Amino acid sequence: MRILSRIASSMLLALAALPAPAQTWPIKPVRFIVAFAPGGPADISARLISVKLAESLGQQIVIENRSGAGGNIGASIAAKSAPDGYTVLLTTSALAVNMSLYSNPGYDAERDFIATALVASQPNMIFVNTGVPARTLLEFIDYAKTAKLSYASPGSGTTPHLTAENLFRVLAKLDLTPVHFRGAGPMVAAVLAGDPPLGSGAISGPLAQIKAGKIRGLAVSSGRRAPALPDVPTFAEAGFPGLEDYTWIAVFLPAGTPAAVVQKLNEAVNGALQQTDIRERLEALAFDPTGGSPQQAADYVRTEIVKWRKVVRDTGAKPD
């Protein structure tokens, strides 16, 4: 009997030693650090899924926008947070780009984070102020050869920044100066004002202004036309085959977060993405809902780091 009592006591001690988040998470609000300003693809998707996550997890999801340095500020804060499941990073493909664009972004995308779930993706787009005398991408390139122009990006190190550098500098042989903003919202506002008159961003940023006729879309970086903007041609249709890039959104947890918490958050994100109303709203904003396992997310991020390392090298892109 004494032996059984000792065994039972040992089991209780072992259970007590398990990290509390693995047993009960979440028991308080969860902070989502969004690494970009309000109005961009990261912020839009975070706010869409946060309602469903709050319902399924039984706790409030607090959105905290920490923009700057192409997503590095928010990512660095998240990387240094306690690995208890109460600080989550929601960011974009900039996380993969920054591994080669910056000599020291303040974190390592693979070492300091657990890729928890892919949320959605969408192509990038080249768009202009309606005062620009060009209705196609090739017309714009001809125009740009005769003028000294700048283009707006949602941040240094974002995939729209690298897409534009690859298109204009490497393929079209243009010398355009990037002007980086803290997210898609400020970037679109600048192009609307004509300063600068050209932008490169994920579709969701300028989508409403394009539909309103206030901004003109020239081309998208997807393999097929975006259903939300069927009149805007792909890069291949516009004369640049083989150039296909996406801005993706994903959820990450700090390294060391218990596997049970990672799995529970992954299931909650997947559950949100399977809701018809969420899928319809994402698709209306030109997002392609993704989902999948943590391993699939980790594998995809790894391939993206390799892909964008080559683009950074080929373009000679600098962080500012």
Image (cartoon, helix red, strand yellow):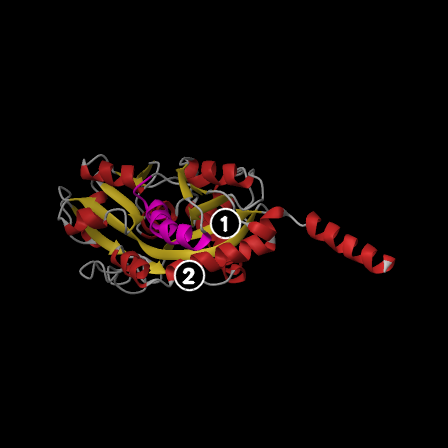
Tell me which secondary structure the magenta stretch mostly adopts. Answer: helix
Q: Is residue 276 left or right of residue 12?
A: left
Q: Quadrant of the C terminus?
A: top left
In terms of depth relative to the viewer, which is nearer, 248 or 47?
A: 47
Label 1 Cα crowd, 10 Å radius (few <14 / some 14-19 / many 20+): many
Numbered circle sitting on residue 252: 1
What range of the chain is rendered magenta?
38-57
In terms of depth relative to the viewer, which is nearer, 225 or 248?
A: 248
Q: Quadrant of the N terminus?
A: bottom right
- The count of marks equals 2
Q: Is residue 70 left or right of residue 201?
A: right
Sequence-earlier tag: 2 or 1: 1
Instruction: Give the residue type that dot 2 points to.
Output: Gly
The residue that mark 2 highlights is 271
- Label 1 sits on a secondary structure element that is strand
Numbered circle sitting on residue 263: none
| Percent position of residue 242, x then y | 35, 62
| Percent position of residue 278, x then y | 32, 58
Instruction: Give the residue type that dot 1 points to.
Output: Phe
